[in-house]
Amino acid sequence: IYFVYSPDGSLSPAHRYTLSRLRDMKMKLFVIIASDSPQQISDEVKSAADALYWKGLGGYDFSAYGIALRAVAEHSPDATVYMQNDSVFGPFYDVRPFIQHSPWDLLGFTASSLLENHIQSYAFVMRELSAARVAALGNVLPTKFAYSINFDVIECQEVRLAHVASQTMSVGACWYSVHEQVPDPVLSRPAELVEAGLPYLKKSVLGGKH
């Protein structure tokens, strides 16, 4: 699943790169796009996706995650899901080995101890997605409202995702940072992480979103 934020419904070069890399991995591709209206979604987006959902611009990425995970649980129960948003460039490397060899039901690529131990939500893998598994995450993936302030999303959803998930599934990450030593691994050590095998680079490291 790839979440694209594009008010005008078009794709940026970074979006095209990500879509191309995911296609190279021979995975079924579910795109959920946030734009001003569904009528704005470009033909390029439509042709790139095996499945396509539209959502409004509000709610940040977790509102898209909630919609997409419920859709997969309903239409393809027990699938293993790879989720990525467009806050990062990449993946630069094939993510299938991460998916195939993960020892956890919920795999994060990087994790931090900020506020509490949590996985960073730009990309993650969830195994055996079911309606029950999604329902267990209802507190962090609500359906009747969406958070509209960035810090609320971080504090109420991203930081709590691993904690809530750990009550019903195993959770882990490939790289972990103690906040006092490395405040945000993908921002503080971007080059080192890519060199070590992390297949992403945060767009904000380069001061942009495209």
Image (cartoon, helix red, strand yellow):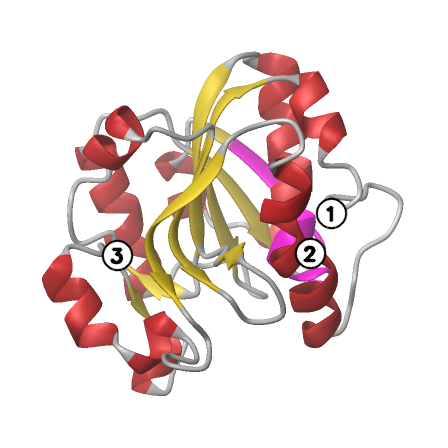
From the image, tell me which residue sits under label 1. 140
Percent across and percent down for residue 140 are 73, 47
Give the magenta range: 52-64
Rendered image quadrant of residue 206: bottom left
Q: Residue 74: within the magenta?
A: no
Identify which amino acid the numbered label 1 is placed on: Val
At x 46%, y 76%, the residue is: 179
Gap between marks 3 and 1 measured at Cα: 26 Å
Which mark is first along the chain, 1 or 3?
Answer: 3
From the image, tell me which residue sits under label 2. 157
Determine if residue 210 is in view. Answer: no
At x 39%, y 31%, the residue is: 29
Gap between marks 1 and 2 measured at Cα: 5 Å
Local packing at callout 3 (Cα closer than 10 Å; few below 14, some 14-19, many 20+) is: many
Provide the secondary structure element on which disc 2 rests.
Answer: helix
Query: Between tags 3 and 1, which lies in front?
Result: 1
Question: On screen, 43 above or below 68?
Answer: below
Rendered image quadrant of residue 45: top left
Count of number-bearing discs:
3
At x 72%, y 55%, the residue is: 56
